[in-house]
Image: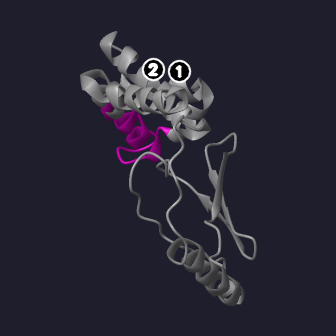
Amino acid sequence: MAEPSAVVHIHIDPIGNQHVVLSSSRQRVQMVITGVLITCSPVTLAFESLGVRNLRRAASDFTVLTQLLVNHAPLAADDRPGLVERRELRDALIALDGKARGASHRDIAKVIYGSERAVIEWGDSDSSMRQKIKRHLARGRRLMTGGYRDLLGRWQQRSLEHTG
C-alpha cells in the first residue's frame, strides 16, 4: 500500500517567520523560513546548520524532507485560499489601494506590518520588508488586471461540482 501524501502545516509567528511542518504517518520535519511567503510563488531555500555539532541532525532532517517531498504524490490544492494565501491577498489589496492613494512603500509597510516593525525592518534598499511590499504591489496589480478571475474560477468550479 502506498504511503499517503505528506501533510503540510504553515504557521506564521508574530514577527513573520513561517514555521512549516511536513509530516507523514512515519516522518516529520519542521523548518523555520524567513523572507518570501512560500505559498506565493516558487522560492529558493537555503539551509543553515547552527554549528558543526548540529550537522548530523541537519543531514537527517534534510533526508526526511527529501523523502517527504520526493517520495509522495504532490499535495492536492484546496479550492479555498488558506490562511497564508488570504493574508497575502489582503496585503496585496492594501498595497494596491495605498499606492493608488499616493502612499509611499514605507507607509504601506506601516499599514500592513505596523509602524514600529516597519521602522525597525525598513533598513537598506534590499531589505526583506521592501521586497515584500514590492511583491504585494505586483500581486495586487495581477489581481486588478484579471487575476481575480482565477480565484473566482476555482470557487465557481468547486461550487458547480457540489451542485451538479
* Relative side of 66 to 36, left or right: right
User: Is 151 colored magenta in this rendering?
Assistant: no
C-alpha separation, residue under disc 2 versus residue under disc 1: 8 Å
In front: 72, or 137?
Answer: 72
Q: Residues within 10 Å of mark 1 (few under 14, many from 20)?
A: some
Circle 1 is placed at which residue position? Answer: 111
The kind of residue tagged 1 is Val
Circle 2 is placed at which residue position? Answer: 94
Residue 90 at x, y percent in the picture: 50, 25
Q: Which mark is residue 128?
A: none
The residue stretch that appears in magenta: 122-138
* Relative side of 95 to 81, left or right: left
Query: In the image, what residue occupies the spot 47% across and 66% down?
Result: 45
The kind of residue tagged 2 is Ile
Mark 2 or 1 closer to N-term? Answer: 2
In front: 5, or 70?
Answer: 5
Which secondary structure, mark 2?
Answer: helix
User: Is 124 colored magenta in this rendering?
Assistant: yes
Residue 148 at x, y percent in the picture: 35, 25
Query: In the image, what residue occupies the spot 38% across and 43% down?
Result: 131
Can residue 3 be seen in the rendering of this structure? yes
